[in-house]
């Protein structure tokens, strides 16, 4: 059998922490979902049992999503692309806020050094806040 994917989930039952493991394996064009479990202190999983047989990988993953909750099947490159875009947008936004606040302070008669330091601080704070906000928005969309 060709191993496709393994997912584990921590569960608590009557105060005891355990780990549930689901494996998706492929054989002869069919996808099988295997289940095994162990307590957190144990080193060995229980005997595997087949909990599902599916004709496509999507059906098997849908079973895991239904059983385990959230299931992220997006590729890593997709996530990295959004993270890089988030970083670029946030840094550009921070830079523009820095320039704007420095110019606004200079035009109001604040000393150049003070205006530059204050502008930098506002730019950095804006960058971090926009990173957090954009990340939240993207995580809700995805």
Image (cartoon, helix red, strand yellow):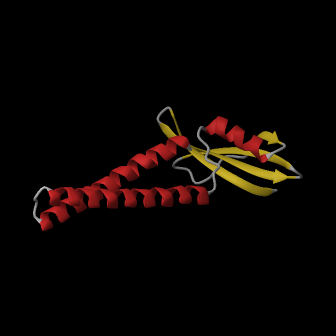
Residue farthest right in this picture: 28
Residue farthest bottom in this picture: 113
In percent of the image, x 82 and y 56: which residue is there?
Answer: 1
- Residue 90 vs 38, above or below: the answer is below
- Residue 101 vs 22, above or below: the answer is below
For the C terminus, which image quadrant? top right
- Residue 133 vs 113, above or below: the answer is above
Q: In the image, is 90 to the left or to the right of 19? A: left
Q: In the image, is 129 to the left or to the right of 88? A: left
Q: In the image, is 30 to the left or to the right of 76? A: right
**Residue 61 on image: x %, y %:** 71, 43
Residue nearest the observer in this picture, 117 or 39? 117
In percent of the image, x 39 and y 53: which residue is there?
Answer: 131
**Residue 58 on image: x %, y %:** 75, 44
**Residue 14 on image: x %, y %:** 50, 32
Residue nearest the observer in this picture, 78 or 120? 120
Residue farthest top in this picture: 14
In percent of the image, x 43 and y 57: which residue is there?
Answer: 89
Q: Is residue 33 visible?
A: yes
**Residue 133 on image: x %, y %:** 40, 46
Q: Is residue 50 visible?
A: no
Q: Count the marks: how many?
A: 0
Residue nearest the observer in this picture, 119 or 121? 119
């Amino acid at each position: 059998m060709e191993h496709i994917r393994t997912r584990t989930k921590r569960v608590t039952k009557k105060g005891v922490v355990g780990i549930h493991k689901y494996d998706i394996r492929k054989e002869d064009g069919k996808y099988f979902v295997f289940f095994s479990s162990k307590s957190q202190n144990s080193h060995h999983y229980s005997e595997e049992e087949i909990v599902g047989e599916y004709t496509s990988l999507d059906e098997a993953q849908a079973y895991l999503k239904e059983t385990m909750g959230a299931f992220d099947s997006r590729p890593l490159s997709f996530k990295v692309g959004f993270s890089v875009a988030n970083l670029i947008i946030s840094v550009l936004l921070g830079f523009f806020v820095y320039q704007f606040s420095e110019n606004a302070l200079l035009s109001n008669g604040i000393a150049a050094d003070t205006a530059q330091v204050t502008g930098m601080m506002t730019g950095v704070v804006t960058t971090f806040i926009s990173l957090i906000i954009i990340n939240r928005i993207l995580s809700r969309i995805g």
